[in-house]
Amino acid sequence: MRAQYQRQPIGTEWTVGAKENTGDGIRAGQRVGGSVALMDDAWWGPTIPVPGRPYFCLAERTLPGGLLVDRSGARFVNEAAPYSDVVHTMYDRHPTDPAIPAWLIVDQNYRNRYLFKDVAPTLPLPDDWYGSGAAHKSWTWDGLATAIGVPPAALRATVDRFNSLALRGQDTDFGRGDSVYDHYYTDPAVVPNSCLAPLWLPPFHAFRIVPGDLGTKGGLRTDARARVLRPDGTPIPGLYAAGNASAAVMGHSYAGAGSTIGPAMTFGYLAALDLAGVL
Ligand SMILES: Cc1cc2nc3c(=O)[nH]c(=O)nc-3n(C[C@H](O)[C@H](O)[C@H](O)COP(=O)(O)OP(=O)(O)OC[C@H]3O[C@@H](n4cnc5c(N)ncnc54)[C@H](O)[C@@H]3O)c2cc1C
């Protein structure tokens, strides 16, 4: 279904959703005439394909002292934007301006200050992250650029530009830090903009970023009572959907923490009220 409905490249190796969820509920609803929506979309998030299980990275992407670059070595997005939005941008650019994979670039100052996944500040990252190509490290920008296959001069120019914006505390290129949302996973000790810090202390690090997700957004189309709708908009008697088997009420966006579980609970409750004849 991912190959059928979603943009390429996609598979099942980048998702952190439950592996049992292969669309049975959606298919069952379709078989009895239910319509679907948002099938191209997912609860996307920039993800590091580390061995074993991909890592859906949240704070690591938005903490100050890090930035994202595409294959040309250029920044392409507000790194602190909602995680679905960042992956939409990765897909929108692909394959004309490839950003799959993209690279999260950080310096040692960042690594000295912040937890990375479950690795405490200053401690080394697992060897197999390097062996698998999910992580790279170099004492020079040119060495790092060569390791990840981006033009060294472009990466140096991107970091120089980013550092000048960080020192001013204003990201006039992508607006990182302009929205309250951007400050959710940042470092309040960093001023004047808690989202932005220059990268200067070697060694420098790069992490491969792919479009992972927490689950898909597409599913059966429902009304305000969680009733599954036919293509003509009429409800199918007795059939309800909520959660990830239904098309997300948030549409293509991600409003903030709880945007998945909150509506799933709410529409489950509404379905029960409707079944009980209370609505
Ligand atoms: C790592 C991670 C972090 C998350 N963090 C948050 C968060 O902070 N806030 C938030 O709001 N959301 C978060 N989410 C998303 C949230 O967990 C999901 O959106 C939510 O669990 C979806 O609920 P659901 O009941 O629709 O589906 P699920 O919880 O996936 O339940 C579906 C169930 O159906 C079962 N199943 C599948 N096929 C069949 C079949 N044929 N027969 C019987 N059973 C079947 C599956 O095994 C599964 O148990 C996170 C998700 C992940 C993976």
Image: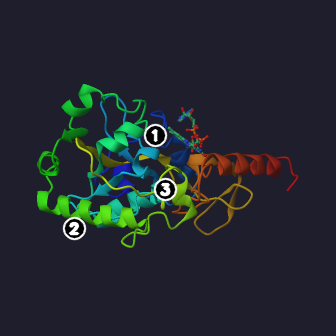
Q: Nearer the viewer, residue 189 or 21?
A: 189
Q: Which quarter of the figure has residue 87? A: bottom left
The label number, if any, that marks residue 194 in the structure image: 3
Estimate the x, y position of residue 238 in percent, counting from the top left. 73, 50
Quadrant, the C terminus: bottom right
| Res. 151 in view | no
- Residue type at mark 1? Thr
Viewer-side label of 3, 2: 3
Q: Nearer the viewer, residue 5 or 261?
A: 261
* Circle 3/circle 2 CB separation < 8 Å: no
Whole-number angstrom distance, CA of label 3 to CA of label 1: 40 Å
How did the renderer colour the structure?
Answer: rainbow
Residue lying at the far right of the rendered structure: 278
Residue 184 in the image: above or below residue 37: above
Binning the other alpha carbons within 10 Å of mark 2 as few (below 14), some (14 to 19) or many (20 upward) gives: few
Whole-number angstrom distance, CA of label 3 to CA of label 2: 33 Å
Asked whether, in this view, residue 277 is left or right of residue 68, the answer is right
The label number, if any, that marks residue 22 in the structure image: 1
